[in-house]
Image (cartoon, rainbow, N blue to C red):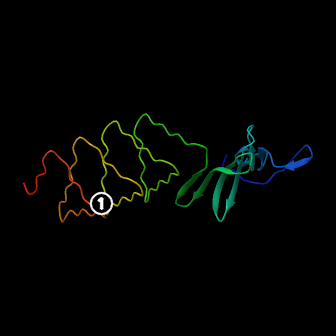
């Protein structure tokens, strides 16, 4: 087969008129090389529908749930595929490495972000790093170092600054 042609097809099902799964030859039936098959809508037993279409020069694969909400969309662009998911949960498991290479990486959570490592956690920032916390911020470790390789270390507080320790050494 040389390709897939997309054409709209309609089946009657009961009193309603709806698109359904159809696999139709669209080429010359005498010449198998010219056979092109067409799928427009795929209905799953769960009631989900997969549709294929072209919009503004981009090929789209869209999967909607029975209520009509988009759960998965793949836009095939000149730069490559763009994936969009909307689901109750997303679990990704890998027995090996999991790497993400991208221009920008954003994570937004409505309730909590929980990072756990049974090994080290390394952050390598080549620009500015800023952390904003509305409530409290607590850092706990066996040992904590704050180093400025070039420039000052500023500690500012709206109220008092408390230093507590067995011994407090300054300029030692």
Q: Nearer the viewer, residue 156 or 101?
A: 156
Q: Nearer the viewer, residue 147 or 4?
A: 147
Q: Nearer the viewer, residue 109 or 41?
A: 109
- Asked if residue 146 is positioned above or below residue 97 in the image, the reply reads below
Q: Is residue 26 left or right of residue 133?
A: right
* Residue 2, position as x, y percentages in the image: 66, 49
Quadrant of residue 155 in the image?
Answer: bottom left
Q: Please state the total of marks drawn on the protein image.
A: 1
Q: Is residue 97 visible?
A: yes
Image quadrant where one finds the C terminus: bottom left
State the residue at coordinates (59%, 56%): 76
Neighbour tally class for label 1: few under 14, some 14-19, many 20 plus, Cα within 10 Å: few
Q: Report the residue marked by disc 1.
A: 126
Q: Is residue 3 left or right of residue 154?
A: right
Q: Is residue 22 left or right of residue 161?
A: right
* Residue 15, position as x, y percentages in the image: 92, 46
């Amino acid at each position: 087969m040389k390709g897939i042609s997309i054409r709209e097809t309609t089946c009657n099902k009961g009193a309603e008129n709806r698109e359904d799964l159809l696999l139709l030859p669209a080429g010359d039936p005498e010449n198998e090389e010219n056979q092109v098959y067409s799928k427009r809508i795929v209905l799953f037993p769960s009631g989900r529908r997969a549709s294929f279409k072209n919009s503004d020069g981009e090929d789209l694969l869209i999967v909607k749930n029975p209520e009509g909400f988009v759960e998965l969309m793949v836009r095939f662009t000149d730069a490559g595929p763009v994936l969009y998911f909307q689901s109750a949960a997303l679990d990704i498991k890998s027995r090996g490495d999991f790497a993400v290479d991208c221009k920008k990486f954003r994570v937004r959570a409505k309730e909590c972000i929980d990072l756990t490592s049974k090994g080290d956690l390394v952050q390598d920032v080549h620009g500015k790093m800023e952390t904003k916390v509305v409530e409290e911020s607590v850092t706990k470790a066996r040992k904590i170092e704050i180093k400025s390789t070039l420039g000052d270390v500023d500690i500012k507080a709206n109220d008092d600054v408390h230093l507590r320790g067995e011994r407090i050494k300054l300029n030692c």
